Amino acid sequence: MSDINGRIAERLRALRHARGWSLDAAARETGVSKAMLGQIERGESSPTVATLWKIAAGFHTSFSGLLEDAPADGGVLLRSSRGADWPSDEGGIQVRALFPFDPVLGIEFLVVELAPGACHQSVPHDRGVTEHVIPLNGSLEVCVDGQWQNVASGEGLRFAADRPHAYRNGGSAPLLFHNLIHYRG
């Protein structure tokens, strides 16, 4: 079992047990099949980014909370988003936590990479969640409420993320963008 799959398995089990949910209840809340949840908990499956977002939404937790612990106190913290041990999926998206969810601040800071031509549909987050996306290279297309907007490198877009939204890379090179997600407490 890879390190990331082990961490995800451990956190999924802990979340489910903390709520007293069976696999059936977790499947109902997340929209992920009981069989898949069981495979993830046993470390037999590498969940896709889309599956992890469904699990996070169903458990009303942050995406990065499935991957690692919250940072220690509010001191200085230097982190790297490099490394291949982060979830990706066949749809051409990879997500890395630059700063995992901080319950005091109510934010997580992600680095997202979209392959050329990739389009990722995101499930709605909990009510009151806001996303801020900032392309680092190239141009990111973002769909909110059925409206596509082009966000160029050096620009930022903030939107209510409690509705369906999507990201698309129409370029010919991989696209990196920062995604700051604010969870209201």
Image (spheres, rainbow, N blue to C red):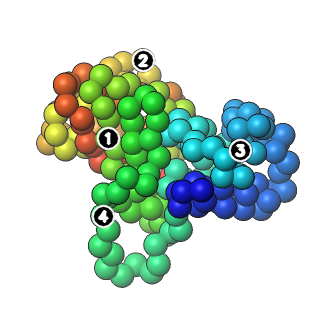
Q: Residue at x 31, y 79 (%)?
A: 76
Is residue 174 shown left or right of residue 165? left
Residue of label 4: 80
The residue mark sitting in front, 1 or 3, is: 3
Name of the residue lying farthest toward the top: 146
Circles 3 and 2: CB distance less than 8 Å? Answer: no
Q: Picture coordinates of residue 44 (x, y %)?
A: 67, 47
Rendered position, 85 above or below 55 = below
Q: Picture coordinates of residue 93 (x, y %)?
A: 39, 36
Q: Is residue 143 visible?
A: yes
The image quadrant of residue 38 is top right
**Residue at disc 1, secondary structure:** strand
Amino acid type at circle 4 is: Ser
Residue of label 2: 146
Amino acid type at circle 3 is: Gln
Q: Residue at x 36, y 82 (%)?
A: 75
The residue mark sitting in front, 4 or 3, is: 3
Q: Residue at x 30, y 32 (%)?
A: 115
The image quadrant of residue 1 is bottom right
Question: For the C terminus, which image quadrant?
Answer: bottom right
The residue mark sitting in front, 3 or 2, is: 3
Q: Residues within 10 Å of mark 1 (few under 14, many from 20)?
A: many
**How far separated are the C-alphas under marks 3 and 2?**
34 Å
Residue of label 1: 113
**How far separated are the C-alphas under marks 1 and 4?**
14 Å
